[in-house]
Amino acid sequence: MAKVSCRKAFSSELLAQARQNPQIWAMATDSRGSVTIGDFFKELPNQSLELGIAEQNAVAVAAGAALMGKNVFVAGPSCFLTARAYEQIKVDVAYNHTNVKIVGVSAGVSYGPLGCTHTSLHDIAGMRALPGLSVFVPADAVQTRFLTRWLTGYEGPAFLRMGRGDVESVYGEEETFQVGRAKLARQGSDVTLAACGECVWQALQAAELLAQRGVSARVLDFFSIKPFDEEAVIRAAEETGAILTVEEHSVCGGLGEQVARTVVENRPVPVKILGFPDSECRVGASADLFRAYGLTGEAIADQALRLLGKGR
């Protein structure tokens, strides 16, 4: 299947849903190009609003529109929405439980060449800490379209996080998903690879490499970060005995720590967290940074073998 970016899948699906429902609004922060949402603004000018480079204002206006009955999707670069407007998301959206969806695009190191100001390795941690705010990280375009459709029918605040570039297809169009439940992307019995976002594809590549070494790796896609599927983690701990987590996010406060907490409280087994370390960030293309920080299929497979005591 051809590669498609999650942001394009989001914008096309949101437009399709908004054509049928005039209560769906889109707001941008001088980010129509970044979000690829220009067609929405052209076709539905009465359901769209440009706020400019003013993320705090955008979230506040979105909350106000939601209180007037609108289902608002405010979209922009995740590095700015989730940092500059954190207080507005906390107070106007989460605490007041307004029907606003924060859509953070170009997350992680999608903007890697632009430097550390444009990285977004904090957003999962920050958003999942807010009460009542759901958090989703799709792995590919199919999952993004599903989540976008689901969110148009969901009454409440949420954060939808995605990258910038075209991504490999993890799922076929006929695939089904359940919010709050991890998606079993590959069955396995020796170790579990728990991933989210674009790292799901890398985890699947690692599982293939591990199979060549006689290791059966289960791959769990935690696209639903909050609500979180603790049962899948506990079951993986009991059935595979070791869990390796992979995410395009800081190792502080993301998927890995959520998995580790669940394991420690319920079924202690060896856990290894892969992500971006708590150190100075590097500048470079996304693919280069994935290699530098050990988030490729080969590096993940090597770490899994070490976790099992079989690596170098």
Image: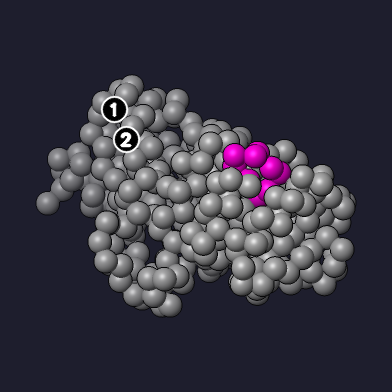
Image point (65%, 50%), residue name: 101
- Visible residue check, residue 189: no
Q: Front-most of 291 and 275?
A: 275
Is there CB contact under 8 Å for labels 1 and 2? yes
The amino acid type of the residue labelled 2 equals Ala
Q: Rounded to the nearest whole Å, what is the CA distance between mark 1 and mark 2?
A: 6 Å
Q: Is mark 1 on a helix, strand or loop?
A: helix
Please give the name of the residue rendered at 46% of the width and 41% of the height, measured from the top-left corner. 129
Label 1 neighbourhood size at 10 Å, few (<14), some (14-19), many (20+)?
A: few
User: Does the rendering let one see residue 91?
Assistant: yes
x then y, percent, for residue 116 = 38, 71
Nearest the eye: 44 or 165: 44
**Which of the image's four quarters has the N terminus?**
bottom right
Residue at 41% x, 55% y is 122
Q: Can you tell which quarter of the image residue 97 is in? A: top right
Does the stretch in magenta take in 153? no
User: Along the line of sight, which residue is nearer the eye, 155 or 165?
Assistant: 155
Which labelled disc corresponds to residue 264?
Answer: 1
Q: Position of residue 301 (x, y in %)?
A: 28, 51
Image coordinates of residue 8 in percent, x first then y, are 65, 65
Instruction: Write down the residue under mark 2.
Output: 260
Looking at the image, residue 169 lies above or below residue 110: above
The magenta region covers 93-101
Question: Is 231 rendered above or below residue 140?
Answer: above
**Quarter assignment of residue 57:** bottom right
Whether residue 234 sits left or right of residue 213 in the image: it is: right
